[in-house]
Image (spheres, rainbow, N blue to C red):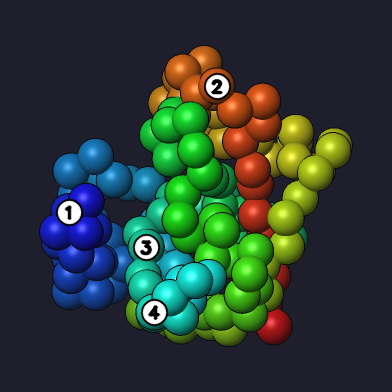
Amino acid sequence: MSDWNAEIIDEFRANEGRVGGMFEGAPLLLLHHVGARTGTDRVSPLMYQEVGGGFAVLASKAGADTNPDWFHNLMANPQTKVEVGVDTTTVRARLVEGEEHDRIWEQQKQAWPQFAEYERTTSRNVIPVVVLERA
């Protein structure tokens, strides 16, 4: 997975935030996060949804039964940064719940139907949604 991510990150940075393949045309950002246990700096390419001047990211992990590592890292270290296009922005992660979660999740499923499939295949009751608010 890290080689696959590295290729996407390189393509993103070489093309002002645009990539091809399965992410072609998708809103994509690079999330910087610090390992909760290791303290290691990491970068993950993620689809996002613009939300009130910030960015919602969805911890779908393609329908896996566990949350992605970046989710655990953000919950432990919520102050971070994202690359969107050619801009790097400092953000603070906030877990959303209730109506706000449901609204963002439903919009994501409508815009990108694979997220509905992720919801069907996971054993998790709720796929977390995190809003990255500009700091």
Mark 2 or mark 1, which has the lower sequence index?
1
> Which residue is under mark 1?
4
Q: Is residue 73 above or below residue 25?
A: below
Q: CA distance from mark 3 to mark 4?
A: 13 Å
Q: Position of residue 101 (x, y in %)?
A: 75, 41
Image quarter of residue 133: bottom right
Q: Nearer the viewer, residue 45 or 70?
A: 70
Q: CA distance from mark 1 to mark 3?
A: 10 Å
> Which residue is under mark 3?
44
> Which residue is under mark 2?
123
Asked if residue 61 lies left or right of residue 129, the reply is left
Q: CA distance from mark 3 to mark 2?
A: 23 Å
Q: Nearer the viewer, residue 1 or 116?
A: 1
Mark 4 or mark 2, which has the lower sequence index?
4
Mark 1 or mark 3, which has the lower sequence index?
1
Q: Are marks 3 and 4 in contact (CB under 8 Å)?
A: no
Q: Are marks 1 and 4 in contact (CB under 8 Å)?
A: no
Q: Residues within 10 Å of mark 4 (few under 14, many from 20)?
A: few
> Which residue is under mark 4?
40
Residue in the image at 46% along x and 49% along y: 68
Q: Is residue 109 above or below residue 68?
A: above
Q: Position of residue 102 (x, y in %)?
A: 75, 33
**Badge nearest the viewer, 1 or 4:** 4
Mark 3 or mark 2, which has the lower sequence index?
3
Outermost top residue: 120
Residue 52 visible somewhere in the drawing: yes
Q: Amino acid at mark 1?
A: Trp
**Badge nearest the viewer, 3 or 4:** 4
